[in-house]
Image (spheres, helix red, strand yellow):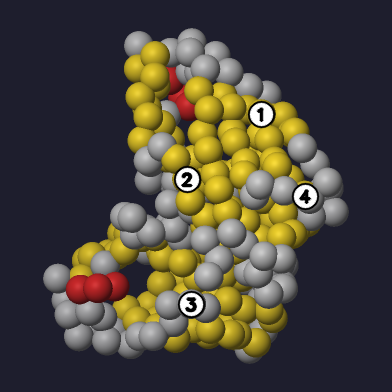
Amino acid sequence: DAGITQSPRHKVTETGTPVTLRCHQTENHRYMYWYRQDPGHGLRLIHYSYGVKDTDKGEVSDGYSVSRSKTEDFLLTLESATSSQTSVYFCAISANSGAGVNEQFFGPGTRLTVL
Amino acid sequence: KNQVEQSPQSLIILEGKNCTLQCNYTVSPFSNLRWYKQDTGRGPVSLTIMTFSENTKSNGRYTATLDADTKQSSLHITASQLSDSASYICVVRGGGGGNKLTFGTGTQLKVEL
């Protein structure tokens, strides 16, 4: 798991409430990513970060915000959760795979249910 | 639009048998292609990464092939084991630079006794 942890691992919340998911890495990687995974879709990029306080949007960023105040932590916030945000959320980091190619390594995931 | 399509969607095979999973992509420009294995309830784990110049790459019982001309890749699993039961995801990097990845929806493989 490349030293990546996610918390919480499971969460059930109600529509309209804010939710924050945390991704923590221990190996000082510069790039971090948040994806969501839904049946019938490939993993889709929500936001990513290329350094402390440096973030950018992915393809499905509406309704989500992120923050990175420390290298090791990348937070994903659902400002007002909706049922369409029920999904499994994966954090990833980018690191050299040892063959000169950057590879993404994924965390264990957070299963979020919005009722 | 950049797309990665995988087939079949799902597959059931008997333990010890071989199988081949397919991946077709339209991502351009192409940088590399990855195969990931995702066990139920876990994050994807990389099996292989192939660049433009590589035609075949093996990782134990897993062998990936790449035809950059036809934009096709395959993942062949030899002598399947129960632990091979998982979703196999094809991912292509390219399409505009940076670390942008386009993910397939995966092939769900089940290996039975």
Mark 1 and mark 2: span between their CA atoms? 16 Å
Is B97 in front, or is B3? B3
Question: Which quadrant holds residue A79?
Answer: bottom left
Question: Which quadrant holds residue B95?
Answer: bottom right
Q: Which residue is mark 3?
A: A59
Mark 4 and mark 2: span between their CA atoms? 19 Å
- The reply to whether residue B87 is in sight is no
Is A48 in front, or is B62? B62
Badge 3 marks a residue whose secondary structure is loop
Image coordinates of residue B38 in percent, x first then y, are 47, 43
Q: Earlier in the sequence, mark 4 or mark 2?
A: 2
Badge 4 marks a residue whose secondary structure is strand
Mark 3 and mark 2: span between their CA atoms? 21 Å
Identity, as a three-letter code, of the amino acid under mark 4: Thr
Q: Which residue is mark 4?
A: B51
Q: Which residue is mark 1?
A: B63
Q: Which residue is mark 2?
A: B6
Identity, as a three-letter code, of the amino acid under mark 3: Glu
Quadrant showing the C terminus of chain B: top left
Chain where mark 2 sits = B
Does residue A66 lie above or below B69 as drawn? below
Mark 1 and mark 4: span between their CA atoms? 14 Å
Q: Earlier in the sequence, mark 1 or mark 2?
A: 2
Residue contact between numbered discs 1 and 2, judged by CB atoms under 8 Å: no
Q: Are marks 1 and 4 on the same chain?
A: yes
